[in-house]
Amino acid sequence: MTFAVEAKGIVKIYEGRVRALDGVDLTVKAGDAFTLLGPNGAGKTTLMRILTTQLRPTSGEARIFGLDVVKKGAEVRKVMNYVPQEMSVWTDVSGYENLLIYAKIYGIPANIRKKTIGEALEVMGLSAIAKNLVRTYSGGMIRRLEIASALLIKPKVLFLDEPTIGLDPSARKAVWEKILSFKKEYGITVFFNTHYMDEADLYSDEVAIIDRGKIVKTGTADELKHSIRVEFIHFGLKSQSINEEVLRKVRTLSTVSNVMVQGQELTVTVENAETSLAGIIDVLRGEGVDIEKISTTKPSMDDVFLKYAGTILSSGTGIREVRQVRRIIKKG
Amino acid sequence: MMKDSLRAMFAMMELELRRLGHDRTEIYTRAIQPILWLVVYGTVMSSIRAIPTGGIPYLDYITAGVLLQSTIFVSVFYGLTIVWERETGVLKKLLVAPVPRFATVIGKCIASGVRSIFQAVIIVPAAMLLGVKFVVDPIYLLLAILLLFFISGGFAAISVIIASFMKTRERFMGIGQAIIMPLFFGSSALYPVKMMPGILRHLAALNPLTYAVDAVRGLVISGDVSHLARDSAAIIIFDVLMFAVASLTFRKVIE
């Protein structure tokens, strides 16, 4: 079977000392949405630039639908398209003109050019503002225009580097809805980088976690969550009637891996909530703790990430880049 | 591949035209300096009559030089857009387009010619108002415009080469200035090459601007086109050489 993307032992060393990628192996099935999830500086962008033939790997090899990215660069560029993290449209012409120039560069025949551009604008919900100068667009509109330009050639693989960075939640959602509807319609493979946990969770068929230049774990979002073998039981307490002694007793249960109290809520971390709940309740009741309500939760991608990459990612880490992107947009 | 390349180059020129269609302010503001050269420097120096111009009024003599100066200003700083597009994602995006890389580089360079032509053309009426007499021959004028277009591409390529090494805008600005002025003064733009001291005369013979000024002056001012073949050959060699080097150094811009 030919994979949409296949990388083997990719190493990239910048200027002979910075080891950005340290042996990356991954495969992406055709038609999947694949997320590369990782903190800033983990090597996400470097890997994407290698896969899109912009950079050569120091060692290792990668193929897009069986085509080697180094040896068959020209052919690879015909089957994929890419939206970089930074702004990639000209702000001093209109949205339509941007697509027109890209369509000409991509070699879309003159007789279907107008139709192709019209469709791309329509799919991305930009038809109404197509004649306006791009500098009047919002960040979300610019992103949608960039994706529209990448969709002009109906690529087999679409690479998106942090597609929603710097966008507000509603713009993020709009961008994703457009990407997914297009993916569904044309069956393209989407490979995207992100550091937003929720995007990896919601929009991808498969997730690979990258940390310090290495893939540390791969699987579907559910597989990853199951793989960390963690669930949480939350006890709502009537009063703050809990003392150190009780906590110590709960902690000594063989099924419990962590106990945390926050206000009137006691959170117990276990491997399996269903089988360990009874034992914990016995201990609490035995100590005279009044339980008002009980709920259980599955782990989130944050928990998965914490486990495999050893750091927690919050949306707050993106603020530096958000500023950077904003600055670029403003200047353009 | 050739077809892909030409297509991409024409698309980049079209982009430049469309940009000018939306906003021409820069063309006007950039015209101020060359017009000052004509109005202030030109009129003052022509009253002295110290420079042998071969019978042409001094103002007419420097008009070709000023046209070229404004052209290379445009094209050298146009290379700056490569640095700028490197900072944004446009360059990355062009690199993954199904177009040979050299076509991207050369396309960017010759697109500067589009801007240069508009820049030069706006100076012509100003010069006419000052009494400069142009050769009235549409073919000569067309050839002059073509020459301006091609020499502009070569200078834009120089600027791409510089941009490959100077990756920030600030550094680039300094170098840009440091290149334009010596080329301008080291050519026949303001005075005949034979007035220069020995060593400068040899350098002027290597200066592509010397040939471009000579050709444009012949076509639009003096009507003497006896050097046109030599000058055009010099410009073509210069362009090919610069395009080749720029295509090679361009790798550095993206890494």
Image (cartoon, grey):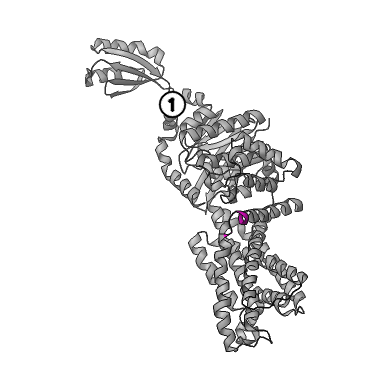
Q: Can residue A71 be seen in this view?
A: no
SS for tag 1? loop
Q: In this view, does B41 lie above or below A245?
A: below
**Residue indicated by mark 1:** A300
Residue A62 placed where, x, y %? 62, 41
Residue closest to the eye, B75 or A294: B75
Using residue B199 as the reference point, say whether residue A116 is left or right of it.
right
Residue B218 placed where, x, y %? 72, 77
Q: Is residue A222 above or below residue A95?
A: above
Using residue A31 as the reference point, say whether residue A317 is left or right of it.
left
Residue at position x 53%, y 62% in the image? B166
The dominant secondary structure in magenta is helix
Q: Which chain carries label 1?
A: A
Q: What stretch is highlighted in magenta?
A: B19-24
Amino acid identity at mark 1:
Ser
Is residue B73 within the magenta segment? no
Q: How crowded is mark 1: few (under 14 residues within 10 Å), some or many (20 or more)?
A: some
Q: Is residue A125 above or below residue A243?
A: below
